């Protein structure tokens, strides 16, 4: 059952892009989608934190959670939605999976963790993959904006690993997100232009919040209780595959052969990184929502 839970979670995350495009098609802007995902997600995680009786946050950790809310929620949610709008669901998902390579670089720069040959090879695979994706000429629209927002989403997503190293062993996930999500929503609020929404728009927002945020996290952690973190992390790399397949079926997005080769290299870099025992990315990958 552990593999089933992780596969289900990764599949729900893989649908983030195509369902977000559905919301865009109804006239909802990317940043408004991000705002509602954070706001409604706060309600769900807040209810869960109350249910399990884990709402206390120590005073010394409040500033860190505030910063995580602004970077890991406001910037990440916003950048990922803008990446989907700029380059499509498939490209955004592939670029997001450069996060483990970014974590390795940031850990080397700021946490003084060694950058050995194994990490260097994984980072090289990932960067080569991004280069090939950016050069591909298929039906997927690759622009500077798409690359910028996609890599920014990966950079801010990387904070989940680094923040998790320090805090997510200390607090349950619902406790952290009870506070981080409202902060993230407030950080997005000044940049949101609210528009009237029809039933389809609300349906898309509800799916993104309930299925691709709350249930995806819940299922992933259910899987982790039954699997090693490394196995779960590798299984979760099905996410960009689901994203690419769904984007092709729903929106007609296609990579060229060069683009698919690049996407494969990005995924190979992720698997190579997390398959090594006792490395930071594989330990903390278990904590990513």
Image (cartoon, rainbow, N blue to C red):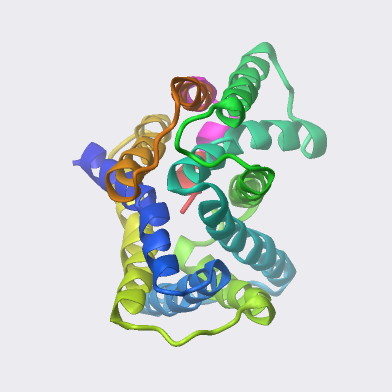
Q: At x 59% / y 70%, what residue is drawn?
A: 180
The mark tally for this picture is: 0
Examine the rendered structure and indicate whether residue 91 appears above or below residue 177: above
On the question of residue 217 being in view, the answer is yes
In this rendering, is residue 170 above or below 137? below
For residue 225, say whether it is visible. no
Is residue 274 located in the magenta-colored stretch of the structure? yes
Q: Is residue 186 left or right of residue 265?
A: right
Q: Residue at x 46, y 43 (%)?
A: 286
In terms of depth relative to the viewer, which is nearer, 80 or 199?
199
Main SS type for the magenta part? helix
In screen coordinates, is 212 left or right of 78? left
Task: Estimate the x, y position of residue 116 in percent, counting from the top left.
Answer: 70, 16
Is 286 inside the magenta-drawn segment?
A: no
Q: Quadrant of the N terminus?
A: top left
Nearest to the observer: residue 274 or residue 170: 274
Residue 181: image location, x then y, percent: 55, 72
Q: Residue at x 27, y 44 (%)?
A: 249
Q: Quadrant of residue 199?
A: bottom left
Residue at 34% over, 33% down: 235
Q: Is residue 30 above or below residue 104?
A: below
**Can you name the residue that lies furthest to the top here?**
117
In magenta, the rendered stretch is 270-284
Locate residue 254, reporting x and y percent.
Answer: 40, 35
- In the picture as drawn, the residue positioned furthest to the left comes out as 1
Q: Nearer the viewer, residue 181 or 280?
A: 181
User: Can you give x and y, in whole percent of width and height, for residue 63 in the image?
Assistant: 74, 70
């Amino acid at each position: 059952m552990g593999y089933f839970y992780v596969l289900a979670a990764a599949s729900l995350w893989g649908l983030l892009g195509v369902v977000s495009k559905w919301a865009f098609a109804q006239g909802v802007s990317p940043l408004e989608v991000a705002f509602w995902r954070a706001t409604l997600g706060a309600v769900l995680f807040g209810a869960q934190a109350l249910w399990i009786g884990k709402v206390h946050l120590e005073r010394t950790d409040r500033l860190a959670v505030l910063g995580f809310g602004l970077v890991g929620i406001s910037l990440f949610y916003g950048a990922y939605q803008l990446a989907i709008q700029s380059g499509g669901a498939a490209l955004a998902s592939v670029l997001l999976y450069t996060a483990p390579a970014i974590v390795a670089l940031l850990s080397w720069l700021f946490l003084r963790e060694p950058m050995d040959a194994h990490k260097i090879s994984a980072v090289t695979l990932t960067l080569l993959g991004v280069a090939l994706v950016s050069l591909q000429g298929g039906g997927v629209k690759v622009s500077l904006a798409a690359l910028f927002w996609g890599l920014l989403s990966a950079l801010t997503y990387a904070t989940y690993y680094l923040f998790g190293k320090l805090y997510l062993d200390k607090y349950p996930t619902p406790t952290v997100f009870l506070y981080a999500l409202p902060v993230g929503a407030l950080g997005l609020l000044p940049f949101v232009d609210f528009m009237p929404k029809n039933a389809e728009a609300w349906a898309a927002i509800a799916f993104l919040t309930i299925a691709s945020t709350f249930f995806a996290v819940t299922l992933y952690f259910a899987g982790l209780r039954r699997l090693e973190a490394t196995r779960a992390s590798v299984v979760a790399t099905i996410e960009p595959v689901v994203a690419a397949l769904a984007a092709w079926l729903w929106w007609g997005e296609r990579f060229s052969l060069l683009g698919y080769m690049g996407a494969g290299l990005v995924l190979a870099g992720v698997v190579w990184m997390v398959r090594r025992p006792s490395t930071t990315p594989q330990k903390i990958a278990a904590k990513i929502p």
